[in-house]
Image (cartoon, helix red, strand yellow):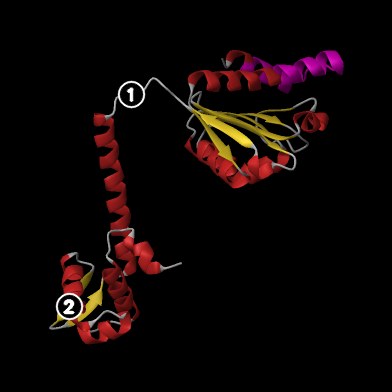
Amino acid sequence: MDITALLRDFAFSKYESSCYLALLTRHPANGSQLSKLSGIARSRIYDVLRGLVKKKVIFEIEKGMYVPLPFEELKKRLRNQFESNIMLLEEQLDAMVGQSSFEYLFTLNGVEEVISKAGDIIDSAGQELYLRLFPQTWERLRGHLDRAVQRGVGLRYISMGPMDLVYDIQVFHPDYDRIKGKLGGESIDIIADKSEALAGIFEKDKIDHSPFIWSRNHWFVTANRDSLRHDFYHYFFDKLYEKEQPLTSRDKQIYAFIKADD
């Protein structure tokens, strides 16, 4: 990775990036020394130094001798500047752009893109998460889910395979042992705060090309959330009528919760 290129992303010119990095490696230093260290011609180095002094990224401690702003301080400054600019951009765009009545469906492809978006959704959740996941996906997202629980986000979890009981509102899909074959792969369903949803299937032999849908469209979110709520009922009906087993006190508590959680 070219460090000078990274610095150029933060409004440093190519020469300024090279000069600052050279001064970090050796300081104090004068213009002649920095010209040799950075590869910048002596005819240009002093203009570059004046520009960096003006930006308060380097400092002249005595006539012709320079030291750099410590990188930790530069990092804090750049982070604060970036966050301030983002806030200003949000304010300006909110003032310029009216609220759209349209919410589009976006297609994601590939494990990395889908899992990254799933983590983002979980990390931004503030109240509730409905999830229907296979154990392997749960393991990938467990850190995000643990942090969500620590923030006080309520999880309503349907496991598509054997695992421990981890969450207060958690059941096992009654047909998880055959559903993977029926679906043709492993599905992911995540609905956050009744406001956004991610859904799709990693199809067998087409994992990196399987389309997933992410959206904040109200009807898409509502339909997917209701689908997961109905799977909770599927669990209860299967236990009562297929397995002919009574509901435990825990089952009854979950049933009452899901029934009221419309």
The crowd level at tag 1 (other Cα within 10 Å; few <14, some 14-19, many 20+) is: few
| SS for dot 1 | loop
**Mark nearer the N terminus (2 vs 1):** 2
Is residue 183 something that shows in the picture?
A: yes
Which stretch appears magenta? Answer: 233-258
Say which of 65 and 143 sits in front.
65
Q: Identify the residue shown where x is 58% and y is 18%.
A: 223
Q: Quadrant of residue 47?
A: bottom left
The answer to whether residue 146 shows anywhere in this view is no
Q: In this figure, which residue is indicated by the disc labeled 2? A: 46
Residue name at image x 71 percent, y 43 percent? 136
Q: Quadrant of residue 75?
A: bottom left
Tell me: residue 31, above or below residue 129.
Answer: below
**Depth order, front residue of 137/159:** 137
Residue 123 x/y as whole percent: 50, 39
Residue in view at x 75 percent, y 40 percent: 204
Q: Relative to 17, say whether 44 is above or below.
A: below
Q: Nearer the viewer, residue 233 or 94?
A: 94
How many labels, in total?
2
Whole-angstrom CA distance, mark 2 to mark 1, is 50 Å
Horizontal and vertical percent position of residue 206: 70, 41
Q: Amino acid at mark 2?
A: Tyr
- Identify the image quadrant of residue 91: top left
Was residue 250 drawn as part of the magenta stretch in this picture? Answer: yes
Q: Which amino acid type is marked by label 1? A: Gln
| Residue 243 rendering spot, x and y as whole percentages | 87, 18
Q: Position of residue 167 (x, y in %)?
A: 65, 33
User: Can you tell which mark lies on residue 146?
Assistant: none
Residue 99: which numbered mark, if any? 1
Q: Looking at the picture, does residue 146 appear above or below residue 216?
A: below
Left or right of 132? Residue 247 is: right
Local secondary structure at mark 2:
helix
